[in-house]
Image: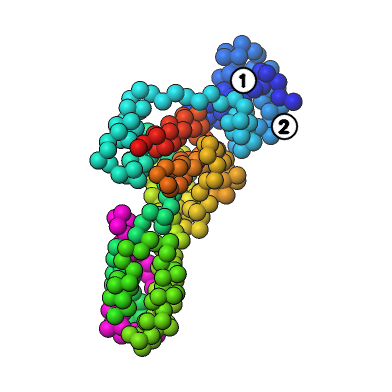
Amino acid sequence: MIGSRQKDLLKCIVEEYVKTARPVGSKSLCKKFKCSSATIRNDMMSLEEMGYLEKTHISSGRVPSEAGYRYYVDNLMEPKKISGEDMLKIQTIFSNKSLALDDAITKSLEIVSDMTNYTSVVLGSKSKDNNLQKVEVIPISNTSIVAIVVTDKGHVESKNISFEKEIDSTELTKTTELLNKMLIGIPLDDIPSKLEFDIKPIIRNYVKNYEMVYNAFYDALSNFASGKDVRFTGKTNILKQPEFSAVDDVKNIISKFESKDVVSKIEESADEVKVYIGSESEFDDNLTVVKTKYHTKGKDGTIAIIGPKRMEYDRVVNMLEYIKENIESRE
């Protein structure tokens, strides 16, 4: 059972370690708690035995464990008020009616990334409110192309397509013309069924290797439809965190930012702001993901802040709640 002084001690150690990134020793806590160094050391040992603190090396200093951060967030954290200056920056973005909502969300999270040195991400459901405007094809070789999809909301995405054998350029031109003729204005969600029932019966009359070409385009365009609109801000901010100075750690995290399968795990189903620490995040054991779901104008999305476990939880939770309120209150 964690005692009252131990709770205060754990809170102090978490907040000190978040600020300094250095293990916290008993001497620095004696004056604050008006206790002897021996008393503080005993309490720190008890917290370590309970799994809330851990040693990084042979020094007497301690750092919070994953369980310690979790206890802090659930029981000890006092949300920090947003400064008037920061609040004004965010309000100015959302009150700008000439700015599309998606852009306002992205810009507000850019501010959070700048203020915190953490990474922010928006996962929007692009397929619900985007119609196809254009499909373009850029040949790379005789057996590969890049397909580019442009939507009416200005979203652009590309995908490499490889064929089993050489494809004549005229066949690709015919296919692209057919897709643009029959798919322009179609919601991305409806594209797979449109391809299967309307385009597939026709394409065989236009293209010699129609099965191979059709299957490749079907896979690519279905992927666009089922994908999420993912926007990162401050990806390289992780380089500014002292715990990620090792090159391999940085490469590992950056590669996860580039993986759609891994990024999709950031999506949130809960309406309140949730904190996932380390292994809880299913993203990376050394990171914390603070995230929430938003609902507005018939579409849903997730906004998230990603940083080290040594994160300013009290500040980030409040910022994310404030941005969510602004998103959902915008007309």
Amino acid marked by disc 2: Glu
Q: Is residue 152 above or below residue 239?
A: below
Residue shown at the point (30%, 33%) measured from the top left = 95
Picture residue at 41% right of the left edge, 57% below the top = 127
Task: Give amino acid for label 1.
Answer: Asp
| Image mark for residue 8 | 1
Per the image, the residue denoted by label 2 is 49
In the image, 35 versus 192, the foreground residue is 192
Q: In the rendered image of this protein, does residue 248 appear above or below residue 184? A: above
Q: Earlier in the sequence, mark 1 or mark 2?
A: 1
Magenta stretch bounds: 149-173
Residue at x 61%, y 34% (from the top left corner): 70
Quarter of the picture containing the C terminus is top left
- Residue that extends furthest to the left in the rendered view of this protein: 98
Q: CA distance from mark 1 to mark 2?
A: 17 Å
* Residue 176 percent across, percent down from the top left: 30, 75
Furthest residue toward bottom: 208
Query: Which mark's residue is nearer the viewer, 1 or 2?
Result: 1
* Residue 254 visible at all: no
Q: Nearer the viewer, residue 291 or 58?
A: 291
Q: Is residue 170 magenta?
A: yes
x, y percentage for residue 270?
55, 42
SS for callout 2:
helix
Residue farthest to the top? 34
Q: Residue at x 37, y 82 (%)?
A: 202
Image side of residue 182 versus residue 256, left or right = left
Residue 277 visible at all = yes
Q: Quadrant of residue 106?
A: top left
Residue 74 in picture, x, y percent from top left = 61, 30
Q: Quadrant of the N terminus?
A: top right
